[in-house]
Image: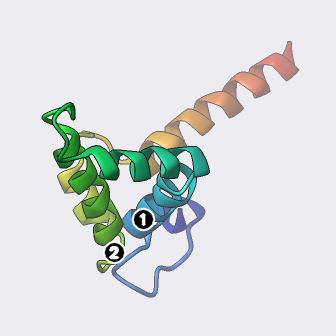
């Protein structure tokens, strides 16, 4: 966001990963219906009828909550680890430039 707006980043690190996890935890994992499902799953995890994957799913949820506490990644590090081959800032600039060009052409007609 800072790059896109042309503002100087005073830190090498951004809160990109932390913000992602924080939002995911707050909006998905902490959602009251999901919390009730997690609580119920924890009661049944070692029972005879439980899914063989239930325990690993609950562990993954715990990992997500733990990972949100770590130092955030730099945007460059995030780009290297992600599956994207493009820079989101550059992509957004191009899309906006195309949209502006289309608007300009429509106004000229």
| Residue 74: percent from left, percent from top | 31, 71
Answer above or below: position of 87 versus 3. Answer: above
Snapshot quadrant of residue 11: bottom left
Q: In which quarter of the image is the C terminus?
A: top right
* Label 2–label 1 contact, CB within 8 A: yes
Q: Can residue 48 be seen in this view?
A: yes
Give the camera-side residue of 61 and 21.
Answer: 61
Q: Which label's residue is closer to the chain start, 2 or 1?
A: 1
- Is residue 2 depicted above or below 56 in this figure? below
Residue 73 visible within the image: no
Q: Quarter-wise, where is residue 75 in the image?
A: bottom left
In the shown orientation, is residue 86 left or right of residue 109?
Answer: left
Considering depth in this image, is 38 or 100 the residue closer to the camera?
Answer: 38
* Tag of residue 72: 2
Q: In this view, does 61 lie to the left or right of 92?
A: left
Crowding at label 2, few (<14), some or many (≥20) Cα neighbours within 10 Å? some
Q: Is residue 9 above or below residue 67?
A: below
Viewer-nearest residue: 39 or 21 = 39
Give the residue at x 45% y 43%. 37
Crowding near pointer 1: few (<14 within 10 Å), some, many (20+)?
some
Is residue 28 found left or right of 108 in the rendered image?
Answer: left
State the residue at coordinates (33%, 51%).
43
- Where is residue 4 shown, x and y percent of the image? 53, 59
Secondary structure of the residue carrying tag 2 is loop
**Where is residue 41 shown, x and y percent of the image?**
34, 45
Q: Distance between the residues labelled 2 and 1?
A: 7 Å
Which residue is label 1 attached to? 16
The residue at the far bottom in this view is 10
Q: Residue 81 carries which label?
A: none
Element under label 1? helix
Q: Which residue of the protein is positioned furthest toward the front in this rendering?
A: 48
């Amino acid at each position: 966001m800072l790059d896109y707006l042309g503002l100087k980043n005073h830190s090498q690190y951004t809160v990109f990963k932390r913000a992602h996890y924080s939002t995911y935890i707050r909006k998905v994992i902490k959602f009251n219906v999901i919390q009730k499902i997690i609580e119920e799953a924890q009661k049944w995890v070692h029972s005879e009828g439980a899914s063989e994957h239930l325990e690993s799913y609950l562990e993954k949820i715990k990992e997500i909550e733990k990972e949100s506490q770590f130092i955030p990644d730099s945007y460059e590090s995030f780009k290297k680890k992600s599956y994207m081959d493009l820079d989101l800032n550059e992509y957004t600039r191009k899309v906006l430039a195309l949209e502006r060009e289309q608007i300009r052409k429509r106004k000229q007609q």
